[in-house]
Image: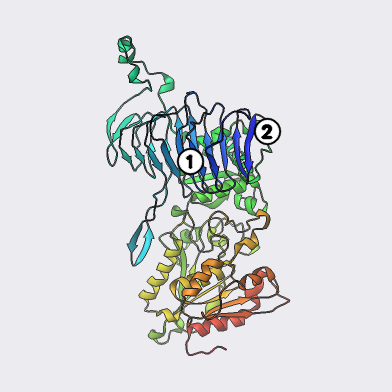
Amino acid sequence: MEYYDYHIKYHKNNNLIISEDPIEYNPIDGIKFNGSNNVLFLKSGVILHSDTQITFEGNRSLVFLGDSVIKVHSYYFNLSVFNDSVVFFGGNTYFNPNGEATHFKVAEMANLFVGRDSLFSTEINVETTDSHLLFDMIDGNLLRNNYAKDIVLENHVWIGRRVSLNKGSYIKSGTVVGNNAVVTKKFTEKNIVVVGVPAKEVKRNVFWRGNSTQKYDINSLNEWSSYELKSSEDYHCDFNVYIDKLTNENDLQKRFSKNLFILESLLVNGTLDVEKKDIDNFTKLFDFFSDKYSAEELSYATDSESNIHELAIRKKDKAAKFMYKNFLARDFIFYQHKNGISNFIKRSLYTPIELQQDSSNGLRKYGDTFFYFEYLGNRKTDKDEKRLLVIFSGMPADDYANDESLITRGGFPLFKNIKRSLVKDTYILRFVDANLASGSFYLNTPNYPDFEENIQKIIKIFANSYNIPSKNIVMFGASKGGFASLYHGLLGGYASVNSDPIINDNIYNNNGRDMHFQESFRQMDLIPRINDLLAQSDPSLKKFIIGNSYVKYTFKQYSKLNMANNGVVFYNTNDSFDNEHPVILRSAIPQVLAMINFLLDDKLSFN
């Protein structure tokens, strides 16, 4: 099968090998696909050593091998790539075949970029992640401290024997890395020599050529004693140039978006349903794919009043969707749309408009987690009877689903006036699902790995600060917030009231719809996780679940929960009139308030 100048050499389980060379060229022995929706793209003239191994261990990854100007065993390595990663080799790079092959491992959604005209010795190890998990003990909690990071080698680098390039390594153009060095950081200077454990810079203004000194003879004395630097060898490989172009030139930005759409077509559909002119700049996409996300702010031109969120989710614009997901995966938050441009900022730097405008409105921030806090002080009774209601908002109303504010898009607020109906002396803590496009169901994601821990920590901080016993702490939520209240209640050992919780998001993902923009960021079916926690939970702690048998797509999921003998109380509204998921809470407000107040006040009874 051929598409224009590209040849499909392998197509199975939605995995592709695409080459610019005819079908009879390039062996595929040693290439293994253990997942699906992966692409191996081979530029013209690629030569693989007979012992080279390329293994796609996961899903949705791309490996790009540039041209082989050196015609002897150009690619000699063992490469393992896992989920959602990009591996790029610019081409014209020599891997020494006379020894143990270089080992590359690319995992945890990190990327590997290797520029052109480089030289690899033998027994080299390059890994974007550690092999196992490391944690710090902080305030009694174990928090992971060794997440994966991209590795970037710019053009014309020489990597010596037995070098280890660890996560976060960045080697600038013209650099020589000495034998046995262990690189653990970014080096900001080009044309340097780095050696040692850990690697350190020892010399600057170094230039090298790949001529073999074993071939030296007397006639080479003058030729090799010095040389005049050619412009092609003065490698100004500053990939920030591509970032600047992406930011400042809308036409390039559109082209980049279109190329991402093309990539999605390859990854998802397994076809090249585009014209050749659309993929002429295919390789340019990867020149800055990894490094461009080092910026703190990015933008996307929609050239319309519709922002990227609306285009991607409501209008199902494939190019916008794929671009949006890539930004989200790199931990950017959409926060503003102006003059046809949707603007993004790193999540850690995100300051909501609500926090900027009014510090008295109750919005606060702990680490990267946003929450609202209020206290029914005017109804205070005995200080020993303080209570805490923790609220997790659900999905936003349709009118606010595409709002610029992530606070609003995340579904805030739920049951805004609930304080009028609570027992006395109750504190209210409302969490904001400030992650991804409209939240992550208050769950950890690869870009936000400590979301759950922060929520649990904030609850404990407030409980300790105001002397609130755990028996007086109640979780409450609806829809995605209903899942969160159940889940975080089980995590922390708290009672909960959970209105129609979404415990399996696959029901909203028919035919790839991904209505909540969660796919590839977290586990979609959350029932096994809930069941594991239920099996360990205290049966004396009540977990109320409210559902409606007329809302079949959510109701039938509850039969998969292990509700017996673990404190779960299921309430079926059995309401044929309010028979849609978004209105179940509204139809059961009296019952929900009764459940919440019963849990907050142990003097009440509930049958």
* 10 Å crowding of disc 1: few (<14), some (14-19), many (20+): many
| Residue matched to label 1 | 290
Secondary structure under tag 2 reads strand
Describe residue 427's horizontal placement relative to residue 192 as left or right: right
For mark 1, give the secondary structure: loop
On the image, the x and y values in percent for residue 429 come to 47, 72
- In the displayed structure, 580 sits above or below 95; it is below
Front disc: 2 or 1:
2
Q: Residue furthest right?
A: 577
Amino acid type for the residue under numbered disc 1:
Ser
Residues at marks 2 and 1, CA–CA distance in whole angstroms: 27 Å
> From the viewer's perspective, is 370 left or right of 581?
left
Q: In which quarter of the image is the C terminus?
A: bottom right
Residue on which the image places disc 2: 3
Give the amino acid type for the residue marked by disc 2 in the picture: Tyr
Q: Position of residue 541 (x, y in %)?
A: 48, 81
The residue depicted at 61 percent of the width and 79 percent of the height is: 589
Foreground pick, 304 / 329: 329
Position above or below: 88 against 482:
above
* Outermost top residue: 219
User: In the rendered view, would you say 150 is above or below 526?
Assistant: above
**Looking at the image, residue 145 lies above or below residue 113:** below
Residue at 41% across / 35% down in the picture? 101
